[in-house]
Image (cartoon, coloured by chain):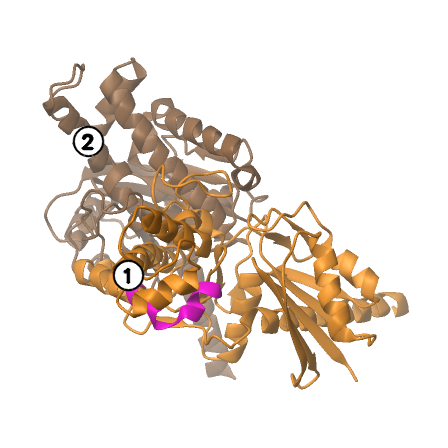
Chain colours: A brown, B orange
Amino acid sequence: MTTILGLDVGGTKIDGLLVDEQDQVLGTAEQPTDERPLHEQVLAVARVMLDGQQPAGIGIATPGEVDSRTGVVRLAVNISLPETPLAALVGDALGAPAFVDHDARAAAAWLLSRDPGADSLAYLSVGTGISAAVAIDGRILRGGAGLAGEIGHLVAVPNGPMCPCGLRGCLEAVASGPAIARRAAQAVRAGEATQLGPDPTPAEVYRAAATGDALAGRVAAEAGEHLARAIRGIALAYGVNQVVIGGGLSRAGDPFLTPILTALDAEREASALVRRALPPGAISLLPPDARAGAWGAVLVARSGLRDMSRERSERREVDDG
Amino acid sequence: MTTILGLDVGGTKIDGLLVDEQDQVLGTAEQPTDERPLHEQVLAVARVMLDGQQPAGIGIATPGEVDSRTGVVRLAVNISLPETPLAALVGDALGAPAFVDHDARAAAAWLLSRDPGADSLAYLSVGTGISAAVAIDGRILRGGAGLAGEIGHLVAVPNGPMCPCGLRGCLEAVASGPAIARRAAQAVRAGEATQLGPDPTPAEVYRAAATGDALAGRVAAEAGEHLARAIRGIALAYGVNQVVIGGGLSRAGDPFLTPILTALDAEREASALVRRALPPGAISLLPPDARAGAWGAVLVARSGLRDMSRERSERREVDDG
């Protein structure tokens, strides 16, 4: 049987999906990331899932700067990652062609594939890191250095909190999972009344906000305002008017989304520009069980295999000609 | 003789260029904008320049939300502008086909046409307003609503100064010409020692900064920091690593550019991501006498005329077929 393995490398876990030609799911896996080199972690998950079988192809979706032609990944701010020829290392070890793309771009390609009517949309991933992937006229934006969409490192607060990337006040430094956990922990330490423990996770913050905890509500509202400004920025910078939000934090659902929509309503109220750029209904959450990254990785493998077979038949034509 | 009229509508003036088929300049004009409806101002400049001749086509580059297919312009934040079918109004009055595009996109198209080696670049216009136009893989980004590149209304300072668009703390509210003039005037009123008069123009601020005036230098440095962050944002959001800066403020030359480059050097020092995204030499100033907007408007007319003649010959084929 021809199978495809899709692997989605996140800031905290690797999500795997093994499917057949008809996209029937044959197996899934979820493995927390650790300190080992990325390709070893990816291989460990892949070996467990494949259990000795050889897949037709392997797709890997990963954060950072990804060159999808060479399969080289580098500069993933939130995972310790020297320049890694990830596709070659994984493909050689498993004896099957492997392909790599940026995780948000893989997810956006999947969203685009599910909605044949859409030709322009942005996918905003909010988790350990924050990045966007943008489809315009049916094509995923890559940019020369493969950096297009790294909006987690646009300014949110000038001279604000330090970001792991080395800059200050990046969107990621004020609205990512770690940023929200840090803000909440600081407020808890300051002695404010709250149901939160001393080191709350972002999920705990959103749960507490949903039950009316004032401290948690304030932290969620602040993050929502930053994300609303980022979404306005996405709409204006790229000229897309459909934004789907996914990533770890989005799994909190309404307590995550409501502060964003509230802040965007206030922006719409204030500005005709925002009303034009982001009509009501422009924002939606990725369903929490969508596994968009892993499905996107499957698409990455399929499109890589298609390119390979096209190149092979072109070479044959040249040889025969 | 076949002539093309290119008109560039800015926040403070309309710049006109009349050229022949070989791009030889037959005439130029510059007219301050006033309170009349936009199409009347454009027509006044055009009539003076044409002096009774009929051009083969008219191209108009204008800020705001521009639908280049319909020729309708709206929502130009800095010029009083209801929804205006600008191409139709101007074309009908002058008896020649008229075409409209966004001013920054027109300038970017011109930059791209001058450098056949470049396929991805951003043009950042900093004047009364701030916007960007981006070419990726040789194509100018438009976006569904024609809003792509409206980065003047991305956040620079959360809850910062009021912007004419209705939002607070937009890049335009802290780094455009009017914002710089306002900041300097506030500091002058506060009684600080300076060579500046009570209501300095941005050009005066940059001239004073160049002679060592501390107040003017501080205002220029702050604007430069905001613009450096915006340029980093452009590089990361679009994945382009060549940014050309034009617009009214850029005519100040080094006193305008140096604070931007200083701030970007500090960002490069701090962040491997910025070093990758913006290699040295990535930033340049548009030569002050380039008239990129007006030349871009000429290109808008030429490409509009090409599309018209292609459509006409396709219709002929259908009729003949």
Q: Residues within 10 Å of mark 2 (few under 14, many from 20)?
A: many
Q: Is residue A2 among the parts visible in the rendering?
A: no
Residue type, mark 2 in image: Arg
Q: In the picture provided, is A282 more to the left or to the right than B183?
A: right
* Percent position of residue B131, x then y: 48, 56
Q: Which residues are magenta?
A: B248-259
Quarter placement of the N terminus of chain B? bottom right
**Corner quadrant of residue B49:** bottom right
Q: Is residue B91 magenta?
A: no
Label 2, secondary structure: give it. helix
Main secondary structure along the magenta-highlighted residues: helix
The one of B285 and A172 positioned closer to us in this rendering: B285
Question: What residue does disc 2 label?
Answer: A183
Residue type, mark 1 in image: Gly
Question: What residue does disc 1 label?
Answer: B217
Q: Residue at the location (18% across, 15% down)?
A: A194
* Percent position of residue B256, x then y: 36, 66
The one of B203 and A313 positioned closer to us in this rendering: B203
User: Given this view, does label 1 or label 2 mark the residue nearer the observer?
Assistant: 1
Parent chain of label 2: A
